[in-house]
Image (cartoon, grey):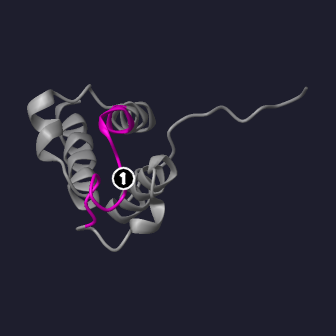
Amino acid sequence: MSEQTPTVVGPKQSDEQIRAQVQAIVLDLAPNPDGLRDAETALVQDLGFHSLALMELAFALEDEFDLEPIDEKTARSITTLGAVQEHVLRRIAEREAGG
């Protein structure tokens, strides 16, 4: 095959693009994606996540956004879609500021 497009990170994504991407991943892995209302949608109560599904979500986000693994204390404080989005945005900003 001739020229293949390499999978490299393109231009910096906007916060809204990242939020949308996070939401898509959350809904793709959610046991009950129909529970989505807004950023305050609860991962466990509304979307039906259980501990194993939450771990899968954490791994998927770490892989997608090249994030460091999340510690248990932080993970327990992330209970809504909006909190997941904010966590990913904060970790990306920290990485970019430090690198």
The location of residue 50, given as percent across then percent down, is 32, 41
Q: Nearer the viewer, residue 26 or 16?
A: 26
Residue at the (36%, 32%) spot, across then down: 52
Q: Position of residue 77 (x, y in %)?
A: 11, 45
Where, quadrant-wise, is the C terminus in this rendering?
Answer: top left
Q: Residue at x 41, y 58 (%)?
A: 23
Q: Nearer the viewer, residue 81 or 87?
A: 81
Name the residue beneath numbered marker 1.
Answer: 48
Give above or below for 18 relative to 49: below
Relative to 58, is 6 on the left or the right?
A: right
Secondary structure under the numbered disc 1 in the rendered image: loop
| Secondary structure mainly formed by the magenta segment | loop
Query: What is the residue that sits farthest to the right in this orientation?
Result: 1
User: Which image quadrant is residue 70 in?
Assistant: top left
Q: Quadrant of residue 73?
A: top left
Report the amino acid beneath label 1. Gly
Residue 50 highlighted magenta (yes or no): yes
Magenta part of the protein: which range? 41-55
Percent position (x, y) of residue 22? 39, 52
Q: Quadrant of the N terminus?
A: top right
Q: Is residue 52 left or right of residue 92?
A: right
Horizontal side of residue 1 vs 40, given as left or right: right
Q: Using the image, determine if residue 81 lies above or below residue 40.
A: above
Residue at the image point whose x is 26% and y is 25% from the top: 69
What is the x, y in percent for residue 44? 28, 52
Label 1 neighbour load within 10 Å: few <14, some 14-19, many 20+: some
